[in-house]
Image: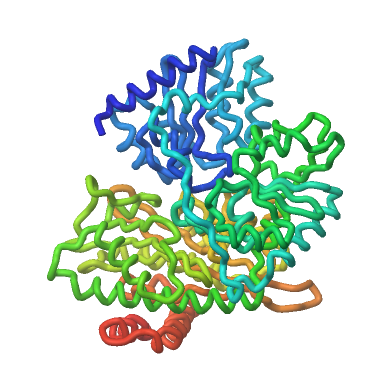
Amino acid sequence: MPPNLYTDRLQHLRRHMTDHAVHAYIVPSADPHLSEYLPAHWQGRAWLSGFNGSVGTLIVTANFAGLWADSRYWDQAEQELSGSGITLMKIAAAGSTDHIDWLAANLKPGQTVGVDGMVLSLAAHRQLHSCLTQRQIKLSTQHDLLVPTWPDRPTLPTQSVYEHPASYCVQSRTEKLALVRSQMQQLGAQWHLISSLDDIAWLLNLRGSDVSYNPVFLAHLLMNHEQVKLFISAGKISAELQEQLKREQIHCCPYEQISEALAVLPEQTALLVDPRRVTFGMVESCHAGVKRIDAINPSTLLKSCKSATQAQHIRTAMEQDGAALCDFFAWFEKAQGKQTITEIDIDIQVCAARAKRPGFVSPSFGTIAGFNANGAMPHYHATAESHAIIEGNGLLLIDSGGQYLNGTTDITRVVAVGTPSAEQKRDFSLELKAVIALSTAQFPVGTRAPLLDAIARAPLWAAGLNYGHGTGHGVGYFLNVHEGPQSISWLTPPEPQTAMQLGMVTSIEPGIYRPGKWGIRIENLVLNVPGEVSEFGEFIRFETLTLCPIDTRCIDKSVLNQAEIEWINRYHATVRERLTPLVSGDALEWLQHSTLPI
């Protein structure tokens, strides 16, 4: 696409800014549900800028346009913004408020900042309003200027909604709603608004395909102690399913009527909302007399703690996922040197291997396959226009995952192509030390997840190394691959809701990235299970769920201690035992060879 196309689009936006007396307009990476992956209808930032990263904030003024992005996207953004007239504004972390500080410093008192309030979280509005007000800068949230600027804007998705099979759900809708209502009662709430799609899907045991990679559907939910109103587009739920929901006091309403429903809530009604998961524009619909109770959605914590039955389903999904990867890696090893293999081929082949497995629904995110220098970009994605051929010597990083009816997977492996160098093997082994350090940790129940981040970093810090992203994220149960409330990250405030509890599934994925050379990230998912019980309380330890060999050809044994070598050998013995019944032929041969003790 010619770079001047983006320049033209920005000029169209500027004309509409002038019409509305807006001096700076913010286009965040968000929708009315504050989703991570956005339906095309809300990908305005990408449409205006050409930057396709999942996180970033675009600000446009009369004579400036800037894209604020963190270190995961710097290389990608520099390439995609080239020639667009948009300046890359580098920030340290995704939660940075640098763009707000820039607005306060560059606008004059009396000028106006515009943003669509329907895609701005309550928490973000609070920060923005506070900072701008101090500088006597106005904030306008009434207008979505993409509407007049984007004439061929995609429509909302229309895919059907379906029930998650009861055998996998474990808990019924009625049981889940009762748990949420119990917490509403404790908080003194009469009504509860939920806009986050994974919370709604979990609570109602429904799934969809409105958002890439996540089995969710566009909807808002408003509930009290007697009934539930589900605001969803017509035609997405069958008449039969609607009747079933109605019998359970769950009533379907038109998607666009959520604001009207909020507007008629009586004065003095106590409404529970999560400020980080509900938008300002949505809550602004309420009468000024409605009493707002700000607290984390009860469903967020409830869905993060998987039951023993769900955990067993997840283990089964991990076995099928591991078997699929055995098929894939067996193909990859045999194909090298016999055919041209590109990073795009890796994506195609790994998705095809998973698609053969029972219960598979879709990838859980876009595959990251980066060879050598491309692997140094944590969120790199190969495209038809820009990708590498996998040949010669080096390291191939593959970060991929699957959505199964019985679980969600997310795994990263780095494998040798040709002969890895001594420096590459040292980096690989240091990164593996970091994975093992956190995988073998034990800590008290209730430890705030961000505090665990340093355990993984310690072996890297000792070697003078570090990485810019977090160490781990929560993972859903046939839901979003990124789930809260726990986050093992120095970027996340260690707030009470981040406490680690039994049943949570989290990733462990430290990294080492050498720009222009290679990237190394080994990632496993782990389950919080009971550890020791002593006079000091109850402890949690991790059970590693992911089942796939770690490439021992990349290991420098001199970097590892004996306990770490024993951990690798125990892990590989488990992988071999669990996956052997599910594979045969080349895949079985590859599995047996790849899990030999070191």
Give the x, y percent position of residue 354.
37, 70
Task: Say whether residue 438 is visible.
Answer: yes
Q: Quadrant of the N terminus?
A: top left
At horizontal 54% and vertical 12% (from top left) the residue drawn is 21
Q: Where residue 193 sits in the image (x, y, percent)? A: 71, 46
How are the residues colored?
Answer: rainbow
Question: Position of 350 compared to 505: left or right?
Answer: left
- Residue situated in front as seen by the camera: 60 or 90: 60
Residue at the image point whose x is 32% and y is 85% from the top: 588
Rendering coords of residue 569 (x, y %): 43, 83
Is residue 450 something that shows in the picture?
A: no
Residue 248's place in the image compared with 257, above or below, is below
Q: Residue at x 53, y 65 (%)?
A: 478
Of residue 168 and residue 549, the one placed in the foreground of this image is 168
Residue 395 position within the rendered picture, expressed as x and y whole percent measured from the top left? 28, 62
> Residue, x 34% and y 73% (percent of image)?
551
Which residue is more in the foreground, 204 or 572? Answer: 204
Q: Which residue of the protein is positioned furthest toward the left in this rendering?
A: 338
Relative to 457, 558 lies left or right: left
Is 67 located above or below residue 462 in the figure?
above
Q: Quadrant of the C terminus?
A: bottom left
Quadrant of the rendered image containing residue 267: top right
| Left or right of 191 in this view: 389 | left
Q: Which of the 4 image quarters holds residue 549?
A: bottom left
Q: Nearer the viewer, residue 389 or 120?
A: 120
- Residue 239 sits in which quadrant? bottom right
How many marks the image carries: the answer is: 0
